[in-house]
Every structure is written in C-alpha cells, then in structure tokens.
Image (cartoon, rainbow, N blue to C red):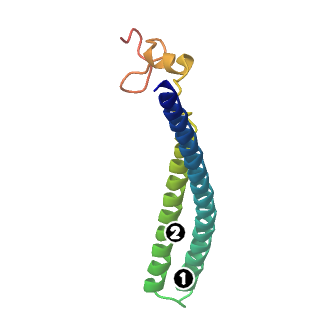
Amino acid sequence: YAEAEQQQLVMSQLYAEQQVSVDVDNWLSAIVRARDRVKAATEALRLAKTLEEGERKRYNLGASTVLFVNLRERNVVESAYQLYRAQADYAVARGGMLWARGVLSKPWPTESLAKYGDPKTAAGLSGQPVAGRD
C-alpha cells in the first residue's frame, strides 16, 4: 500500500512538473506573439498618421474632402486602439509568464512594503506627506 501511495505521489509530481513546463511554453509563445503584434501595430500607427497628415495637406490644398480626412483620422484611432490592445496583451502575457514560473507566489520584500505603513513616508489624501498621520 505504501509503495502504491509513493508511486502516486511521484506521478502527481511528474504531472505538476509537466504542467508547469507546458504553461511556461504557452506563455512564452504568447509573449512572442504579443511582442510581434506590438511591433506591427506600432508601424501601422506610424503609417496611419503619415497618411492622415498627407490627407490633411491635400485637404488644405483643396485636393481632398473632409470625408477622406475623417476616414484617415478614424484609421489613426483604430490603429492606436490596436496598438493599445497589443500592449495590453503583451503585459498580460508577461504576467502570465511570471505566474507560470512561480515568481508571483513569492512574498514581497518587506523593505518595499514598509514605506506604505510608515507614517513618516505615507501620503495623505492630497498626495502630500502629512505630519503625524496614523
């Protein structure tokens, strides 16, 4: 009975190790994909802004209409949103990688948390240090 229990513990540990490995691989893949999306979205936003500036110049010269300027502006906003989403996905992927590696389960260092409970360094509602607070 003890051998079977020991074998079960070994198998469950092996399963947990494999699960961690799979999670790390998945989050690494997500980081790479998100990083590539950030690069592509940054370039798309740059190009959209260039087109919008060109369309605005054409409009100022009388060679374009407000409709085309508005379309270019909407394209800039859409490109900026895509960049925002890509950056958010990248941040989530980095957080997921930290979680998969077990970094987030470690306790915070006390020196970084101590400043929040110290009345001498804590800030009041206005953000300014208040003498004798707490």
> Of the residues shown, which amino acid type is indicated by label 1?
Asn
Disc 2 crowd rating (10 Å Cα; few below 14, some 14-19, many 20+) is: many
Q: Is residue 105 among the parts visible in the rendering?
A: no
Compared with 16, 56 (above or below) is below
Question: Where does the image place residue 70, in percent across and percent down from the top left?
Answer: 44, 79
Residue nearest the viewer, comparing 20 with 50 = 20
Question: Where does the image place residue 83, in percent across and percent down from the top left?
Answer: 53, 62
| Numbered circle sitting on residue 79 | 2
Mark 1 residue element: helix
Residue nearest the viewer, comparing 12 with 60 = 12
Question: Residue at horizontal 41%, vertical 15%?
Answer: 130
Mark 2 residue element: helix
Compared with 124, 24 (above or below) is below
Q: CA distance from mark 2 to mark 1?
A: 24 Å
Residue nearest the viewer, comparing 34 with 5 = 5
Q: Which residue is mark 1?
A: 60
Question: Where does the image place residue 56, in percent across and percent down from the top left?
Answer: 54, 79
Number of marks in picture: 2
> Of the residues shown, which amino acid type is indicated by label 2?
Ser
Residue nearest the viewer, comparing 42 with 56 = 42
Question: Residue 129: which quarter of the image?
Answer: top left
Question: Residue at horizontal 47%, vertical 64%?
Answer: 81
Compared with 121, 43 (above or below) is below
Compared with 109, 5 (above or below) is below
